[in-house]
Image (cartoon, helix red, strand yellow):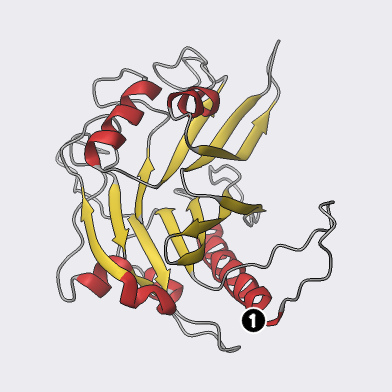
Amino acid sequence: MKIITWNTQWCCGIDGRVDPARIVAEAKRIADFDVLCLQEIADNFPDPRLAGSAGEDQFAAIAALLPSYAAIPGIAVDHPAEVGRRRRFGNLILSRLPVRQVFRHLLPFPVDPGVNGMPRIALEAAIVAPFGEVRVITSHLEWYSQKQRSAQVEALRAIHADGHAHARQGSITDTLGGPFHTHLRPAPAIITGDFNLEPEDPLHARMQAPFADGTPRLTDAWDALNPGVAHPATFCIYMKMEPGGSELHCDFIFVSEDLKPRLKSIRVDQQTQASDHQPVILELG
């Protein structure tokens, strides 16, 4: 099972061109992926709202370019427009493996007076991998507010623990095919995305802290496969926040402990310039 996670910057490349087709083409070049987890997908935010955009529905455009994949949108920002469809912004999971069920978890957005920010979502798909079912969760945590980012890390931990509790204790109560139909949640979990924090940030360690109820801990897949090796840069390689600014390392894939034996490889593609972030590619076997 190969997974790519990628913050696409609303499909805007370093050259300033917005092109959903280029994102798909680059993802295909990078890996023969089974699951593609994308952040910063936009709909109806034309320039100057998002630089370079014509207001295209990127959720629909990317789905159309990958017709053999199930496309699962996760809308975090939902705004009115002057005319026509609403303005939407969020995450997108595409899977060519069967998807059993989907959860859309709005993340905490505690008030932080005077600090910029936007609503955030964790998009979860229960996917049937060749080795069994697994929960794939992708998110994009707040950049500006430490208060909100901290609350969102706690929420991701709670989502993982809640899903694992359902896997441990859940039972089939309804098989009639209606809204109450039971789909048991799988125990293994993969949490991907742009966390907007560095590996040295205490919140990175907090993601991997033990759970009091026996939920398996989460582990940074890069650290598990490359102990003692620094994370490659995933942000600000080709476009700096300020002249001479540092490269950042904020895109991660965490896996539950029960998946650690299945980790085969992880890498960062630092060649593509189709976004201001670099994709992270994980293979499990």
Q: Amino acid at mark 1?
A: Arg
Q: Which one is nearer the viewer's eye here, 282 or 250? A: 282
**In the image, residue 149 lies at what x, y percent?**
50, 58
Q: Quadrant of the N terminus?
A: bottom left
Residue at image point 43% right, 29% down = 10
**In the image, residue 2 lies at what x, y percent?**
33, 53
Q: Which residue is mark 1?
A: 168
Residue 281 versus residue 253 in the image, above or below = above
Q: Quadrant of residue 278?
A: top left
Residue 261 versus residue 91 in the image, above or below = below
Q: Is residue 141 visible?
A: no
Q: Which one is nearer the viewer's eye here, 73 or 53? A: 73
Residues packed near mark 1 inside 10 Å, few (<14), some (14 to 19) or many (20 plus): some
Q: Quadrant of residue 230?
A: bottom left
Q: Which one is nearer the viewer's eye here, 11 or 82? A: 11
Residue at image point 18% right, 71% down = 226
**In the image, residue 262 lies at what x, y percent?**
33, 71
